[in-house]
Image (spheres, coloured by chain):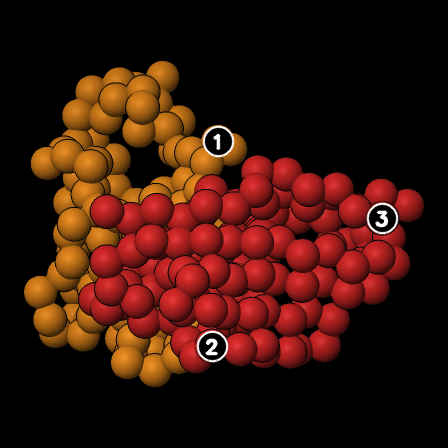
């Protein structure tokens, strides 16, 4: 497909387990972003990858959260020892280089529920 | 710090005009975006402003005043399908977006 894809679409996990969320950006987009959106809240920035530069991790809420981007394309967001407050929709977005007036294209999100 | 404020909810009538305001205080500024988000769906891009003034795109227009840290989104000839949340977001110099909490717009017949 031509858009950003994310998997799984829904994930239910028990408190304390680790989860991995996957994002496939639009081909050719060098910038990739992760956000999360809690019920009724705005989007909270988590992490930003731009090409081969070091990622901007300033939005990660704790050291239980990490992300990597392999080969400048697919990205995986990992949450270790999940807590109930981690329940949210995790959105991935990609864009052309951020030096341009480039919009971010969002994926459909992964709804994470921690029980 | 970063702060983006917009009204939580607004209601308007089909066929009318509505203006959604956004004020911001952020460290670094590289443009302001408006996104539309229908319930249960991902945000979709509406507009981008980096210079002061009005950008018009069909029924939607967006205005920016950098000196005042202020933007608005203007929706004309409202349709029922415009019922959604409208998100104001500022791009920081580093490239990531800081989002407001969104304005939920309800369009009534």
Residue lying furthest right: B109
> Mark 3 and mark 2 in contact (Cβ < 8 Å)?
no
Name the colour assigned to chain A in the rendering. orange
Q: Which residue has dot 2 on it?
A: B52
**Residue B81 placed where, x, y %?**
77, 54
**Residue B95 placed where, x, y %?**
26, 67
User: In terms of depth relative to the viewer, which is nearer, B56 or A95?
Assistant: B56
Q: Are marks 2 and 3 on the same chain?
A: yes
Q: Is residue B105 left or right of residue A81?
A: right
Q: Is residue B88 left or right of residue A30?
A: right
Residue A11, by quadrant, is top left
Q: Which residue has dot 1 on it?
A: A39
Please tell me whether mark 1 or mark 2 is closer to you in this view: 2
Q: Crowding at label 3, few (<14), some or many (≥20) Cα neighbours within 10 Å? A: some
> Mark 2 and mark 1 in contact (Cβ < 8 Å)?
no
Distance from disc 2 to disc 3, alpha carbons, whole Å, reads: 29 Å
User: In terms of depth relative to the viewer, which is nearer, B66 or A104?
Assistant: B66
Quadrant where the C terminus of chain A is found in the figure:
top left
At 41% from the left and 60% from the top, the residue drawn is B69
Please tell me whether mark 2 or mark 3 is closer to you in this view: 2
The chain identifier of the residue carrying mark 2 reads: B
Distance from disc 1 to disc 2, alpha carbons, whole Å, reads: 33 Å
Q: Crowding at label 1, few (<14), some or many (≥20) Cα neighbours within 10 Å? A: few
**Residue A14 placed where, x, y %?**
30, 19
Q: Earlier in the sequence, mark 2 or mark 3?
A: 3
Distance from disc 1 to disc 3, alpha carbons, whole Å, reads: 26 Å
Please tell me whether residue A87 is drawn above or below residue A16 in the rendered image. below
């Amino acid at each position: 497909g031509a858009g950003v894809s994310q998997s799984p679409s829904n994930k239910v996990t028990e408190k304390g387990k680790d989860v991995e969320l996957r994002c496939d950006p639009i081909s050719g987009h060098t910038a990739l972003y992760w956000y999360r959106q809690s019920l009724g809240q705005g989007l909270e920035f988590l992490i930003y990858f731009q090409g081969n530069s070091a990622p901007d991790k300033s939005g990660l809420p704790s050291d239980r959260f990490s992300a990597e981007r392999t080969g400048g394309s697919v990205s995986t967001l990992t949450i270790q020892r999940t807590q109930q407050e981690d329940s949210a929709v995790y959105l991935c977005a990609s864009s052309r280089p951020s030096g341009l007036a480039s919009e971010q294209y969002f994926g459909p999100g992964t709804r994470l529920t921690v029980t | 710090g970063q702060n983006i404020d917009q009204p939580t909810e607004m209601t308007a009538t089909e066929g009318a005009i509505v203006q959604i305001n956004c004020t911001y205080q952020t460290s670094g500024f590289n443009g302001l975006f408006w996104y539309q988000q229908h319930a249960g769906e991902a945000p979709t891009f509406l507009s981008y402003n980096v210079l002061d003034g009005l950008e018009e795109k069909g029924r939607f227009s967006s205005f920016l005043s950098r000196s005042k840290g202020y933007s608005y989104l203007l929706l004309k000839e409202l349709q029922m399908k415009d019922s959604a949340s409208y998100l104001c977001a500022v791009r920081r110099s580093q490239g990531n977006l800081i989002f407001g909490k969104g304005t939920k717009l309800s369009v009534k017949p």
